[in-house]
C-alpha cells in the first residue's frame, strides 16, 4: 500500500485528538477511496523530475525560480507517451500555465500550445521564453558586455526615477533603488525590443529570487507588467 493511502486511512480511521480533518481533506480521502484501485506508482517519475528542480540545469528555464512549475523533462516524458499513441499532431492546453514550462516544451516538440495564466509575472516569463528564440545571440552578447562595463549606481541612473507603488516604497534600500534606476537606463539603450525584454526579464528574475516569499506574493500579484 502506498504512503498516501496509508495517510488517508489514518485520517479517516482513528483521528488523533490533535488532528483536525478539514472538509477539503475529507474530499481528498473520498477521492482516494474511490480511485485507489486504479492508482499506480510510476517509478520513472521521481520528485526531481516532476518538480522544478530539473529546470535548474536548463538555460533560461533556470532564470526564474518558480517552485510551482513542472520540469521540462516531465512534460517531455508525458508528451512522448502521447506521441506514440496517436498520429495526429498534438495540441496542448494548459489552463494553469505558471511560467510556461508545459507550453514552451510542447511548442519545442512541435505541438500547438495554448495557455492561460492568472499572474502577470507568469505571463511575463512565458513571453520571455518564447521571445528568447527570436533574440539574436550577437545582439544579446553585445549588450551583455555593455552591462559588464555599466556602473549600476546613481552615476548611471541618468535622472531616472523609480516608478514606486505604495507596496514597493519600503521594498528596497536606496542603493538597490539606484541600481534598478541605472539598470532601467541601461535597458533604454537597447533598441531591439526582444533583446530589451530578455534583459528586463533577467532583472525581474533576480528581484524575485531576492524577495522573501510573502513579499513576492504581494509584489507579483499587484504589479501589472505588460
Ligand atoms: C502549478 S502552477 C502551473 C505549472 C505549469 N502548468 C507548468 O507547466 O509549469 C499553477 C498556476 O496556476 C495559476 N492559476 C491559479 N488559478 C488560476 C486561474 N483561475 N486562472 C489562471 N491561472 C490560475 C497560478 O498562478 C499558478 O501559476
Image (tube, rainbow, N blue to C red):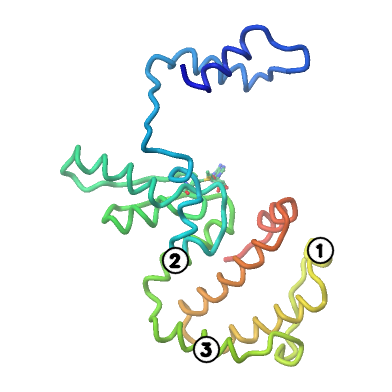
**Residue drawn at x 68%, y 89% as measured from the top left:** 151
**Residue drawn at x 55%, y 61% as measured from the top left:** 64
Crowding around mark 1 (Cα neighbors within 10 Å: few <14, some 14 to 19, many 20+) is few
Q: Is mark 2 on a helix, strand or loop?
A: loop
Query: Quick check: 108 left or right of 19?
Result: left
Q: Which of 199 and 65 is in front in this view?
A: 65
- Determine whether 13 is above or below 149 in the image: above
- Mark 2 and mark 3 in contact (Cβ < 8 Å)? no
Write down the quadrant of residue 78 in the picture: top left
- Determine whether 186 is above or below 27 in the image: below
Query: Quick check: 200 left or right of 40?
Result: right
Query: What residue is shown with label 1?
Result: 166
Q: What element carries label 1?
A: helix
Query: Quick check: 135 left or right of 6?
Result: left
Asked whether mark 1 and ligand 1 are closer than 8 Å, the reply comes as no
Which mark identifies residue 145? Answer: 3
- Alpha-carbon span between mark 2 and mark 1: 34 Å
Q: Quadrant of the C terminus?
A: bottom right
Q: Give residue 119's position: percent from left, percent from top.
A: 59, 53
**Residue drawn at x 33%, y 44% as measured from the top left:** 77
Q: Nearer the viewer, residue 121 or 153?
A: 153
- Give the mark nearest the N terminus, 3 or 2: 2
Q: Give residue 220's position: percent from left, percent from top.
A: 66, 57
- Mark 3 and mark 1 in contact (Cβ < 8 Å)? no
Query: What residue is shown with label 2?
Result: 59
Crowding around mark 2 (Cα neighbors within 10 Å: few <14, some 14 to 19, many 20+) is few
- Alpha-carbon span between mark 3 and mark 2: 19 Å
Q: Give residue 43's position: percent from left, percent from top.
A: 38, 33
Q: Nearer the viewer, mark 2 or mark 1?
A: 2
Q: Give residue 4's position: percent from left, percent from top.
A: 53, 22
Amino acid at each position: 500500500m502506498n504512503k498516501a493511502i496509508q495517510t488517508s486511512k489514518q485520517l479517516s480511521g482513528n483521528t488523533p485528538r490533535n488532528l483536525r480533518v478539514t472538509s477539503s481533506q475529507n474530499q481528498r480521502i473520498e477521492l482516494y477511496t474511490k480511485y485507489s484501485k486504479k492508482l499506480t506508482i510510476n517509478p520513472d517519475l521521481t520528485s526531481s523530475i516532476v518538480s522544478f528542480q530539473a529546470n535548474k540545469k536548463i538555460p533560461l528555464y533556470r532564470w526564474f525560480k518558480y517552485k510551482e512549475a513542472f520540469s521540462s523533462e516531465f512534460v517531455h516524458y508525458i508528451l512522448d507517451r502521447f506521441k506514440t499513441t496517436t498520429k495526429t499532431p498534438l495540441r496542448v492546453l494548459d489552463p494553469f500555465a505558471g511560467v510556461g514550462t508545459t507550453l514552451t516544451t510542447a511548442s519545442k516538440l512541435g505541438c500547438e500550445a495554448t495557455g492561460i495564466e492568472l499572474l502577470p509575472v507568469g505571463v511575463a516569463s512565458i513571453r520571455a521564453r518564447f521571445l528568447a528564440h527570436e533574440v539574436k545571440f550577437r545582439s544579446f552578447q553585445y549588450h551583455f558586455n555593455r552591462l559588464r562595463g555599466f556602473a549600476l549606481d546613481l552615476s548611471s541612473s541618468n535622472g531616472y526615477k523609480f516608478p514606486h507603488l505604495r507596496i514597493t516604497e519600503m521594498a528596497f534600500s536606496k542603493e538597490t533603488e539606484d541600481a534598478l534606476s541605472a539598470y532601467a537606463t541601461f535597458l533604454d539603450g537597447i533598441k531591439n525590443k526582444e533583446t530589451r525584454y530578455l534583459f528586463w526579464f533577467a532583472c525581474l528574475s533576480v528581484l524575485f529570487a531576492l524577495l522573501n516569499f510573502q513579499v513576492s506574493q504581494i509584489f507579483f500579484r499587484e504589479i501589472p507588467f505588460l
